[in-house]
Image: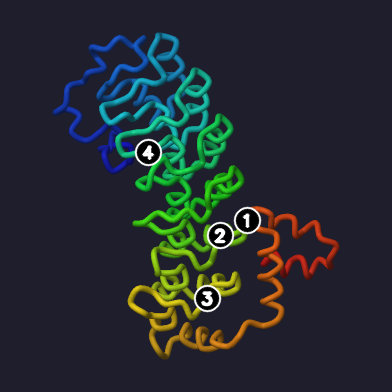
Amino acid sequence: MAGRGGRGSTGKPQGLAARPRLWAFANPLMSDFVSDWSPMHDAAINGRLLSLRMLISQGYGVNLVTADRVSPLHEACLGGHPTCAGVLLKHGAQVDGVTVDWHTPLYNACVSGSQDCVNLLLEHGASPHAVCDLASPIHEAAKRGHLGCVESLVSHGANINENIRHLGTPLYVACENQQIACAKKLLESGASPNQGKELDSPLHVAARNSSSDLVHLLIDFGAEPHSKNAEGKRPADLVPPNSTLAQVFSQKEGPLSLMQICRLRIRKCFGIKQHHRISELLLPEELKRFLLHI
């Protein structure tokens, strides 16, 4: 498997001894030869740059894959080793190779939280979009709180409102896992505060988790406190009646202030990924900071 869960403490796939070590009989010059586990994979996952260079010079293919279609580049990114990833890419590694689990090197880089690997892959043409609903780089980065990876993906055109049926949107995933910094970055980049997982909004999951910071953040960015989920419940219905959050929702029951309405309207006019241009407006710094939620 492409994830760490499929390996033992040595970094090799679990049950390796029970499977034939096909690479021992393979011609390393055959770059597409399917192997079980090779010295190339071992060097890449452990960040052994000198060993990796030596193996390449001996003729080992950079696109040698395991039975699960895992390449050395997948392993370098999963291990968070941008230098090894760079050497592999320089020698022709497939930047968007897909494993049987639909994991790309970019997805693995988001698992490890290596922004350097993410940037390197994107610079070499990696697609920032999910290959399928089973493995989305931006959802994985948001889930794990890897802010740098989220920033890089957003700047390279990742769909910040991509709604995956079993996960929801990246914002929903960030809120579900209480990753406040990632949620803020997504909102600042134009993510819809009301798109979540089916009828469950990000505000619903923030309320369910009793996350006061996320509730305030979402409402500031225009989340609708009166929206109802599949059970017909509003976010306020998901918090204890006498809690601090219940008081917050009670205070937000009325209409938005004129200042809040203006801020939301101005941000909407700029559209997704254009909010940075607010800083270019000929307005007092205090007002620009208000519009930018700084």
Q: Amino acid at mark 3?
A: Glu
Q: Which mark is residue 152?
A: none
Q: Are the residues flagged by discs 2 and 3 in contact, CB closer than 8 Å?
A: no
Residue at point 43%, 29% (across, down): 47
| Lower sequence index among marks 4 and 1 | 4
Tell me the distance, in whole angstroms, between the alpha carbons under discs 3 and 1: 19 Å
State the residue at coordinates (35%, 73%).
Answer: 230
Look at mark 3 in the image and give the residue it sits on. 224
Disc 4 marks which residue?
103
- Looking at the rendered structure, the secondary structure element under dot 3 is loop
At a point 41% along the width and 62% down the height, the residue shown is 177
- Which of the two discs, 2 and 4, labels the residue nearer the N terminus? 4
Say left or right for 57 vs 192. Answer: left
The residue identified by callout 2 is: 191
Callout 4: SS: loop
In screen coordinates, is 291 left or right of 204?
Answer: right
Q: Earlier in the sequence, mark 4 or mark 3?
A: 4
Rendered view: 75 above or below 189: above
State yes or no: discs 3 and 1 in contact (Cβ < 8 Å). no
Q: CA distance from mark 2 to mark 4?
A: 24 Å
Q: Which mark is residue 272?
A: 1
Colour convention of the picture? rainbow
